[in-house]
Image: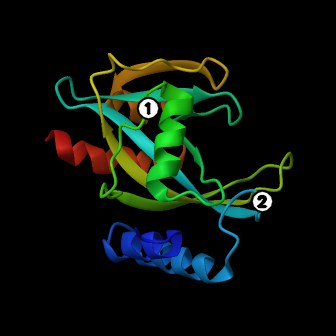
Amino acid sequence: METFEEQIKSAVGLNIADELVAKRFLERLKEGRYTRDEYPRSHYCVYFLPYNPGTRQVFIVHHKKSGLWLSPGGHIDRGETLIHALNREIQEELGIRDKVKEGTWPFLLTITPIDNSVQPCKEHLDIWYRFPTDGSDLTVDPREFHATQWVTIDDAKKIITDGPNLTALSKIEKFFY
């Protein structure tokens, strides 16, 4: 099994990020302290975009902490691989256990600047995964979100304002058409 560092290098090697994002991912890797616990200011995160290929809809959440409509996801914890972090976040937020298997690769890398005075976090290095589902197995944690909904990509683009989330929607749209 690859180390976390090897997984990040492999993800960058997939050419799923623009040049500046790929460069920052590798620079940040050299800095060490990859998780929020180790370095609250800048850390890696996993995001997953639940989508239903049959209905061509995506599942989005109105996140309580950010106040934004987003795709689900969260911080990677110390000692986790990308797939362990992804499965933990999927279980915590949607109630699905161990759905993503080793060998699954991300489809996008982004960076989210965090602009707030409440917490020390200033940068998320986002690793994005597709998550196909018809939604029948979802059990949403109401402590995490104000609301959730299945919407078309066009409708999602009307209510999502976060740049990396909009980029992920544009990338996933290619799977539908």
Q: Quadrant of the N terminus?
A: bottom left
Q: Which residue is mark 2?
A: 40
Q: Quadrant of the C terminus?
A: top left
16 and 20: which is toward the camera? 16
Q: CA distance from mark 2 to mark 1?
A: 27 Å
In primary-sequence order, the first of circles 2 and 1 is: 2
Looking at the image, residue 8 sits to the left or right of residue 141; the answer is left
For residue 72, say whether it is visible.
no
105 and 120: which is toward the camera? 105
The numbered disc on residue 97 is 1
How far across and how far down the image is residue 136, in percent? 32, 16
Determine whether the residue tagged by mark 1 lies in a helix, strand or loop. loop
* Residue shown at 67% from the left, 77% from the top: 32
116 and 59: which is toward the camera? 59
Q: Looking at the picture, does residue 55 appear above or below residue 112? A: above
Amino acid bearing label 2: Pro
* Residue shown at 31% from the left, 73% from the top: 15
Determine whether the residue tagged by mark 2 lies in a helix, strand or loop. loop
Label 2 crowding class (10 Å Cα cut-off): few <14, some 14-19, many 20+?
Answer: some
How far across and how far down the image is residue 44, in percent? 59, 61
How far across and how far down the image is residue 99, in percent? 36, 37
Q: Looking at the picture, does residue 145 appear above or below residue 117? A: above
How far across and how far down the image is residue 82, in percent? 47, 57
Image quadrant assignment for residue 69: top right
Amino acid bearing label 1: Arg
For residue 130, say whether it is visible.
yes
The numbered disc on residue 7 is none
Q: How many marks?
A: 2
* Residue shown at 43% from the left, 43% from the top: 48
